[in-house]
Amino acid sequence: MSDKHTSRRDFLKESSAALSITALSGAGAEAEAAPADKFQPEEKWLERMKAPDDGKRFGWFVDTRRCFGCHACEVSCKAENDVPLGHYIRQTIYKDVGQYPQVARAFLPMSCQHCEDAPCIKACPCGALHKEAGGTVAVDYNVCCGHGTCVEVCPYGAIYLDPVARQAVKCHNCYHRTEVGMEPACVPTCPSEALYFGDLNDPESAISKAMAEAEAADGELKQLRPEKQTRPRMWFAGRAPVEVEEDVPREGKSYGPDAYSIYNWKKGETHE
């Protein structure tokens, strides 16, 4: 991360005393509108869509065949990035599938997809969203005005508005760690080794090897909502993306605690 960018942690420390802690609402009020209707003119975002010419192409591989839903990735992410209660930068979404006695629980770890053609960058009216090293989609907290249009256009529900700083928050690939050669906090925390992050341009990187092995063993890897044409940089192995996709938040929504409600354990019923 370059010096011109203030980290979210530093920003919160400087501003929390001056800002009231009130939850923001209404970011998804116009979620029904086509995302393209919310995009800024191309000349306002074209340069921000270009990643630094560093020869790297960061991406994610999630092996849902290994994930057993411990939520350690969420906990480490919250601790690393000071994520407040009730909000999430990443979330493991689960769903019970099958019919008794042949039942199973599918787990889908989700976060920002760091899209090649990121709609959040196109929609940002203040120019805060941009590409960092390796193509990481990040927020400049010296610039973000908390408009919330990025939330309205994200096809994966991966952005929320911080209730203290009143700014957009999302996964930034832990660039404060990756720039010193470390992995994002969630990766080494995962006990089942289901998460991989790294340079897709390097055939010898752990992520490249894991993706090749998974594809050879289980067939073509999956991506979430490719019809959105955002060209996400996250691939999945296993059945979970197919089973759980309908429960992943869409435009105008964000990850939230309702995903863990016991009333979601059995879909299709009305609970009073």
Image (cartoon, rainbow, N blue to C red):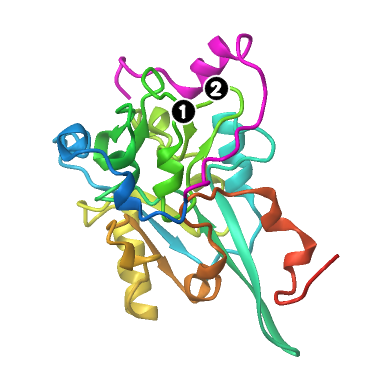
Residue depicted at 21% across the width and 51% down the height: 202
Residue 171, image quadrant: top left
Residue located farthest toward the right when viewing the structure as drawn: 272
Residue 16 is one of the magenta-drawn residues: yes
**Region of the chain picked out in magenta, as a range:** 1-30
Percent across and percent down for residue 83 are 60, 33
Percent across and percent down for residue 133 are 26, 34
Residue depicted at 38% across the width and 79% down the height: 217
**On the rendered structure, is 20 left or right of 177?**
right
Residue assigned mark 1: 146
Q: Amino acid at mark 2?
A: Ala
Screen quadrant of the C terminus: bottom right
Residue 79, image quadrant: top right
Percent across and percent down for residue 63 are 46, 65
Q: Amino acid at mark 1?
A: Gly
Task: Tell me if label 2 and label 1 are in contact, CB under 8 Å.
Answer: yes
**Residue 74 in sight from this viewpoint:** yes
Percent across and percent down for residue 29 are 53, 46
Q: Nearer the viewer, residue 233 or 47?
A: 47
Q: Nearer the viewer, residue 257 or 219?
A: 257
Residue assigned mark 2: 165
Residue 152 is one of the magenta-drawn residues: no
Q: Magenta part mainly helix, strand or loop?
A: loop
Screen quadrant of the N terminus: top left
Marks 2/1: CA distance?
8 Å
Residue depicted at 72% across the width and 66% down the height: 264
